[in-house]
Image (cartoon, grey):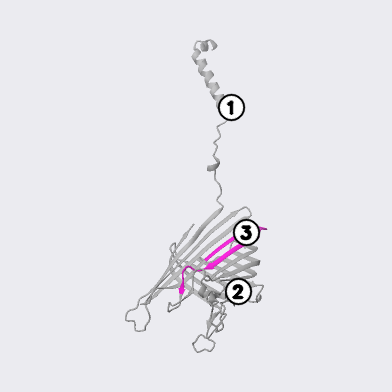
Amino acid sequence: MLKALLRFPFLILFLSHLSLSTASAQDIPAPVQIIPADTAAVPNSWDFGGTGTVNFSQVSLSNWAAGGQSSLSALGILNIYSNYKKGKNTWNNTLDLTYGTVKLQEQRLRKSDDRLELNLKYGRQASSKWFYTAQLNTRTQLSPTYTPERDSVISNFMAPAFILASIGMDYKPNPKLSVFISPFTGKFTAVLNQRMADYGAFGVEAAQRDLEGNLIPGTGERFREEFGGFVNVRFRNEIFKNVILQSKADLFSNYLHNAKNIDVSWENLVNFKVNKFLSASLFVHMIYDDDILIDIDRGGDGTMDGKGPRLQLKETMGIGLSYKFE
């Protein structure tokens, strides 16, 4: 056998080469693929999203014996959120915009609703359900609101604006509920329209008066500062299939002035989801603030002859187009 192999030296060389190649393939490890640091997958700690809704309402009358007015109205609602979570730190940011218009027959277009609210909240986890929290909330409107005669402005952008700066603890027993408790809260009311500030609108100090009792223009305070305790409760849950309830209650007590008089703001929004693009909504907002004086009829004769604190109520309902984005 050996003599036969020696006659074919090329066969010996081929077998030797095959043996070395097999050994090399077994002994040499496979190359490791190195992923550059800038292309490695990094978990996204931010969560963005929101919903946009446009509701329409239209009434057209022609020779209608029972009477009435033709009307056309539109209401737009935009809710945007931006949340961050990494380790024990969280950021929860929301922006809510509402704007509505209505036109009655031959009358000019009027504003029916106007709201802008920005909320910024930072939290650091203290336990499984409690967070150290700092919060900044701002509420105002986008455009001026006029009297029915359109002879004067009764509110405008930053007139008023309500600003709350709070430090406290946030209790989150589940994703549906949040209860923020702050013993240290600054509440600021801004009325940047000087004419409105001179009349003491929205609780700011009115202008001084001369010896004849006339207002001295430009002497009204445009800012009001308060310090007290604040409680904010937020709840969101699907109470029925495709029916979502969002509720928010704000309670504020001024330590330095009538501490037992609680300022209350309670908002409730119910969204009814018909399908991917059609929805209906019901929004109810109640406010009570004893520093905001409302025109009242003390004598019951139809003439506004006084001012006093009253429960403020706003309700809107509509059906229209809705889109959810993430």
Q: Is residue 127 left or right of residue 288?
A: right
Q: Nearer the viewer, residue 207 or 277?
A: 207
Is 277 magenta? The answer is no
Mark 1 residue element: helix
Residue linked to disc 2: 263
Residue sitting nearer the eye, 83 or 186: 186
**Image position, residue 153 (x, y; %):** 47, 75
Given the image, on which type of amino acid does mark 2 rest? Asp
Query: In terms of image quadrants, where is residue 322?
Result: bottom left
Say which amino acid is labelled 3: Gly
Q: Look at the image and give the residue range highlighted in magenta.
A: 117-145
**Label 2 Cα crowd, 10 Å radius (few <14 / some 14-19 / many 20+):** some
Residue sitting at x 54%, y 42%: 38
Q: Earlier in the sequence, mark 2 or mark 1?
A: 1
Label 3 and label 2: CA atoms lie apart by: 25 Å
* Residue 87 falls left or right of residue 196: right
Q: Position of residue 249 (x, y in %)?
A: 58, 70
For marks 2 and 1, give the CA distance: 79 Å
Label 1 crowd bin: few (<14), some (14–19), many (20+), radius 10 Å:
few
Q: Is residue 297 above or below residue 102?
A: below
User: Is residue 118 highlighted in magenta?
Assistant: yes
Furthest-left residue in this view: 63
Q: Quadrant of the N terminus?
A: top right
Q: Which amino acid does the dot numbered 1 rest on?
A: Asp
- With respect to residue 311, does 178 lie above or below? above
Say which residue label 3 marks. 123
Q: Quadrant of residue 201?
A: bottom right
Q: Which mark is residue 27?
A: 1
Q: Secondary structure at mark 3?
A: strand
